[in-house]
Amino acid sequence: MKYLPKEAPEPVAFVDSISELSPDDNQLYRKTSYISLLKKVNLRRFLISEQHGLCLYCQSQIELTTSLIEHYLPQSTYRTESLTYTNLYAGCDCDKFRGHTNNKDKFSISVSDNEDRFCGHHKDSTELTWSPVKELKAFATTTSGNPYFEVNTETGCIKGIGENEGLVNEFIGICNLNHKLLKRARSEAFKAVTESGLTLKEMIICVASNPELAYNQFILNGLVV
């Protein structure tokens, strides 16, 4: 994950995505609750675009058919925040996840077993106690090391480091970010770097210098912030 700034005022495109015509007077009105928003696809399209086509949690590439709308603060507890701009993100639908791997285990997710899910499906209504989304230090650069995550480039496993190590590991567990498919995708991303002929530093700079493009964020995850 990396920090995704959501600053005031709200983007006009966001307000448009949660506004719908009233059958009473045929005027556009901003919806105030997620449950009352009838056409959620517009909101999902906006969030995906804002995140450059990357899942909030695992950084895999997403589109309309493979994504879900995520609430940082769970709706079950924070109903009045259900359509607040700073509380809305896009995540991958792990039940449809096909990842960045050609291995047969990419189809092995069991939709009946929550422990075999990841990201928003695994998080469910759990309230996060920490997330890099809310940490200003996690803003992407091409020079600094990630103060929160460390990645094993061979296995693709990530773990917490630094003063927030315990909270980071808790976050990784809540979102099941060391699921076998995610680890495989990370390790294959680093393998691609090696086979490309570029140094890891060159690849990082190349990826991070093109934030407007949908890119393989696994290259950055755990290496730069």
Image (spheres, rainbow, N blue to C red):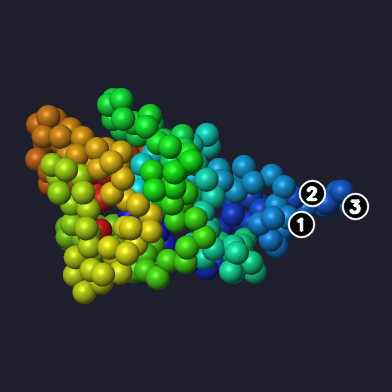
In the image, what residue type sits under mark 1? Answer: Tyr
Q: Position of residue 71 (x, y in %)?
A: 53, 59
Closest to the observer, 133 or 141:
133
When the figure is inspected, residue 184 is found, relative to residue 121, above or below; the finding is above
Displayed quadrant of residue 94: top left
Would you call the spot at circle 1 few (<14 residues within 10 Å), some (14-19), or many (20 or more)? few
**Percent of width and height locating residue 61:** 39, 39
Q: Assign a secondary structure to mark 3.
A: loop
Q: Are marks 3 and 1 in contact (CB under 8 Å)?
A: no
Is 193 displayed left or right of 184 in the figure? left
In the picture, the disc for residue 24 is 3
Q: Quadrant of residue 155?
A: top left
Residue, x 70% and y 62% (percent of image)?
Answer: 32
Query: Can you see residue 208?
Result: no
Residue located beneath label 1 in the image: 29
x and y, in percent, of residue 225 in the image? 25, 58
Amino acid under label 3? Asp
Q: Which mark is residue 21?
A: 2
Earlier sequence position, callout 3 versus callout 1: 3
The Cα atoms of the two marked residues, 1 and 2, are separated by 6 Å
Check whether the beta carbons of the residues at disc 1 and disc 2 lie within 8 A of each other.
yes
Mark 1 or mark 2: whose residue is earlier in sequence: 2
* CA distance separating discs 3 and 1: 11 Å
**Type of residue at label 2?**
Leu
Q: Secondary structure at mark 1?
A: strand
At a point 52% along the width and 65% down the height, the residue shown is: 73
Asked which secondary structure carries label 2, the reply is: strand
Residues 64 and 99: in front is: 99
For image coordinates 40% across by 70% down, the residue present is: 129
Q: Residues within 10 Å of mark 3 (few under 14, many from 20)?
A: few
